[in-house]
C-alpha cells in the first residue's frame, strides 16, 4: 500500500475512533502508523487540541467531564507515542543508508541543464554544463507585442563564468 | 548499380593500409548499415514545453501543407515501383539513422579514435565508412553484429527529485554517481523519501525499441488572454476589441533513445523538460485606445519555471545513474535517478 493510501486510512481510523468516542491512540493501526511516521503526530495533536476547545464550550462541559478519564488516557498515550516516535527518529538519524555507489567517471558522457523563469515580461535563463564546468546566465526582456514572445526579445545582459568541473 | 557494386567490392577488401611511424596499420572498410538505420523509425521534432504560442482560428494551426505525392493521379510522379524504399521519407530516415550510428560509433568506439589517419563517416544511402585499426574494426564488427541480433526492449525510468544541497551530503552523494547493484536503488529512494524537504517531482518510465527514439509527455494546456487589439469591422466601421489568446503547455516531457553496445552496456540519450505554471494567473488591467476613448482590458501573463536536462549516459544493463544538477538559483539540487535495463520482448 502506498503512502497516500496509508495516510487516508490513518485519518479514516482517527475520525472513526473520535466519532465512536474512542481514543484514537488506542487503535493499534493508528499507533503503528504514528510510530512509523512521526510527522503525523503534529496534525493529530492539532486536531485533538481543536476538539478540546470544543469540549470547553458550555454545552459540552458535561460530556467533557464524562470523558475526562479517556482524555487522561489519551494524554498518556500521546506522551508514550511521542516518546516512541522520538526514539524511532533518533534511530533513523543514526542509521546511515547502506548502499554502494561508484563515481560516474566514463558513465555520464554529457550533462547539460537549462533553468528558465518567465514572469510574463522577461526571461531569465541559466545554462549549466556539469561536466565541462561552465555556466551562463541570460536575462531577456520580452517585446511589448505578444505576437511572438521568445524570438522578439531584447538581450539585457549576458554573462558566463567558470564553475568547478567535477 | 555500378556504385553499389563498387561499394560491395570495397567492403570486402582493405583499400588503405598505412604503417607510418611504427603505428598500427589503418584499414578502410565500408559497412552497409541501412537495415539498422531503418529500425530507427521516423524522426520527429522535439517538443518544447513551457513556451507560449498564439492560438489561431480553429484548425489553422494543425492544418499541414498538402503533400503532392498523396494526391491521386499525381502520386505516380513522385513514387516509383517500390514506394516503401524509394520514398523521400525513407531516404531521410536512412540518412538520419546512419548518422546516428556513426555518432554512436564515434562516441563509444574502443579503442577510441586517436590518430589523424583514423576516421569515420557515413553516406546518405546508409553506408558507414571507417578507417581504423584492426582492433577498432573488430569492435565495430562486434557492435553491428550485437545490434542486429539484439531482440530485447529497453526500459528507462527517470525519477526527478528536488533535494536540499546539505541533505545530499548527509546521504553521501556529492556528485554524479552510479549504482551498479539494482538492489541498492530502493534503499536510496527510501532514504530520500525519509529525508525532510525532499520533493519527488515525477517518475516517468518508458519501454523503447533499441535505436528508436521515444517521447512521453504529461501536459496541461492552459489558454489565457495575453493581449487585446482593436479591429475595425463593418457595418458602420465600428471598433471591436479582440482578445489575443495564447496557449501554454506545462507538465513533463521525456525523450529517450537507447542503443545497446557489446558487453551488456546501453548507451542512453535522454532529454527531460519540466515546466511549472504558478497558479492562479494574476491578471492586470491595461488601457486600450479606441475612437470612443480609453477602455480598460484585463490581461493575464503566466509565471513559468522551466528546467531542461540533456544527458548522454553509458550504463551497464540494469544499473542506475544518479545525476546531480545545481541550478545555482536556489540551495536545492535537481537529482535525476536514471535506471536502464533490458526487458524481454513479449
Image (cartoon, helix red, strand yellow):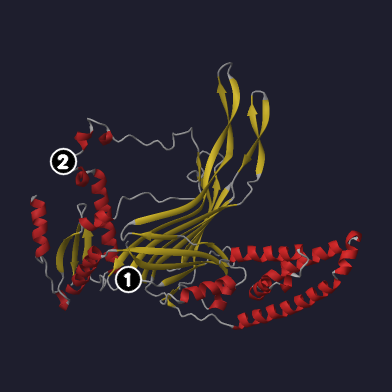
Where's residue B36, x and y in %? 24, 58
Q: What element carries label 2?
A: loop
Residue at 64% over, 62% down: A8
Furthest residue toward right: A58
Disc 2: CA contacts within 10 A as few (<14), some (14-19) or many (>=20): few
Figure label count: 2
Q: In which quarter of the image is residue B32?
A: bottom left
> Is there any visible trace of residue B180 in the rendered image?
yes
* Viewer-side residue, B192 vs B245: B192
**Numbered tag placed on residue A73 in the rendering:** none
Disc 1: CA contacts within 10 A as few (<14), some (14-19) or many (>=20): some
Label 2 close to label 1 by CB (< 8 Å): no
Q: Mark 1 lies on which chain?
A: B
Left/right of residue B96 with respect to residue B161 in the rendered view: left
Left/right of residue B263 with respect to residue A38 in the rendered view: left
> Is there any visible trace of residue B174 in the rendered image?
no
Q: Mark 2 lies on which chain?
A: B
Q: Earlier in the sequence, mark 2 or mark 1?
A: 2
Q: Quadrant of residue B212?
A: bottom left
Furthest residue toward top: B236
Q: Mark 2 points at which residue?
A: B81
Where's residue B110, x and y in %? 26, 72
Q: Do labels 2 and 1 share a chain?
A: yes
Where's residue B329, x and y in %? 57, 62
Q: Name the residue under label 1.
A: B265
* Viewer-side residue, B6 vs A31: A31
Residue at 65% over, 74% down: A32
Q: What element carries label 1?
A: strand
Amino acid at each position: 500500500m502506498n503512502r497516500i493510501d496509508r495516510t487516508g486510512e490513518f485519518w479514516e481510523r482517527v475520525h472513526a475512533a473520535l466519532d465512536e468516542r474512542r481514543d484514537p491512540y488506542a487503535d493499534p493501526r493508528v499507533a503503528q502508523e504514528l510510530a512509523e511516521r512521526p510527522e503525523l503526530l503534529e496534525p493529530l495533536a492539532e486536531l485533538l487540541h481543536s476538539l478540546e476547545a470544543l469540549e470547553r464550550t458550555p454545552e459540552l462541559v458535561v460530556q467533557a467531564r464524562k470523558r475526562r478519564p479517556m482524555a487522561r488516557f489519551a494524554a498518556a498515550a500521546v506522551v508514550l507515542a511521542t516518546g516512541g516516535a522520538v526514539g524511532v527518529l533518533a534511530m533513523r538519524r543514526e542509521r546511515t543508508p547502506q548502499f554502494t555507489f561508484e563515481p560516474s567517471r566514463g558513465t555520464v558522457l554529457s550533462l547539460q541543464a537549462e533553468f528558465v523563469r518567465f514572469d510574463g515580461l522577461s526571461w531569465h535563463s541559466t545554462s549549466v554544463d556539469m561536466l565541462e564546468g561552465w555556466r551562463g546566465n541570460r536575462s531577456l526582456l520580452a517585446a511589448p507585442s505578444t505576437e511572438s514572445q521568445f524570438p522578439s526579445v531584447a538581450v539585457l545582459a549576458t554573462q558566463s563564468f567558470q564553475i568547478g568541473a567535477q | 548499380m555500378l556504385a553499389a557494386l563498387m561499394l560491395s567490392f570495397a567492403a570486402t577488401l582493405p583499400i588503405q593500409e598505412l604503417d607510418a611511424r611504427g603505428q598500427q596499420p589503418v584499414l578502410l572498410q565500408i559497412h552497409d548499415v541501412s537495415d539498422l538505420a531503418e529500425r530507427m523509425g521516423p524522426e520527429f521534432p522535439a517538443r518544447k514545453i513551457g513556451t507560449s504560442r498564439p492560438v489561431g482560428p480553429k484548425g489553422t494551426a494543425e492544418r499541414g501543407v498538402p503533400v503532392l505525392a498523396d494526391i491521386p493521379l499525381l502520386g505516380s510522379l513522385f513514387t516509383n515501383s517500390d514506394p516503401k524504399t524509394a520514398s523521400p521519407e525513407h531516404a531521410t530516415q536512412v540518412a538520419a539513422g546512419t548518422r546516428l550510428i556513426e555518432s554512436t560509433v564515434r562516441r563509444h568506439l574502443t579503442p577510441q579514435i586517436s590518430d589523424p589517419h583514423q576516421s569515420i563517416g557515413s553516406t546518405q544511402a546508409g553506408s558507414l565508412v571507417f578507417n581504423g585499426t584492426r582492433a577498432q574494426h573488430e569492435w565495430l564488427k562486434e557492435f553491428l553484429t550485437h545490434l542486429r541480433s539484439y531482440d530485447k526492449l529497453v526500459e528507462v525510468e527517470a525519477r526527478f527529485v528536488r533535494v536540499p544541497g546539505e541533505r545530499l551530503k548527509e546521504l553521501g552523494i556529492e556528485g554524479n554517481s552510479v549504482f551498479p547493484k539494482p538492489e541498492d536503488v530502493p534503499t536510496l529512494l527510501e532514504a530520500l523519501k525519509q529525508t525532510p524537504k525532499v520533493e519527488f517531482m515525477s517518475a516517468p518510465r518508458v519501454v523503447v525499441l533499441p535505436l528508436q527514439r521515444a517521447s512521453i509527455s504529461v501536459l496541461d494546456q492552459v489558454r489565457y488572454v495575453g493581449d487585446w487589439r482593436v479591429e475595425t469591422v463593418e457595418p458602420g466601421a465600428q471598433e471591436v476589441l479582440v482578445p489575443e489568446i495564447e496557449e501554454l503547455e506545462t507538465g513533463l516531457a521525456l525523450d529517450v533513445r537507447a542503443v545497446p553496445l557489446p558487453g551488456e552496456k546501453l548507451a542512453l540519450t535522454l532529454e527531460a523538460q519540466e515546466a511549472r505554471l504558478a497558479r492562479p494567473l494574476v491578471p492586470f488591467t491595461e488601457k486600450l485606445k479606441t475612437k470612443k476613448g480609453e477602455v480598460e482590458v484585463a490581461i493575464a501573463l503566466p509565471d513559468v519555471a522551466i528546467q531542461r536536462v540533456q544527458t548522454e549516459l553509458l550504463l551497464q544493463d540494469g544499473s542506475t545513474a544518479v545525476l546531480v544538477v545545481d541550478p545555482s538559483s536556489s540551495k536545492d539540487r535537481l537529482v535525476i535517478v536514471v535506471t536502464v535495463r533490458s526487458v524481454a520482448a513479449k
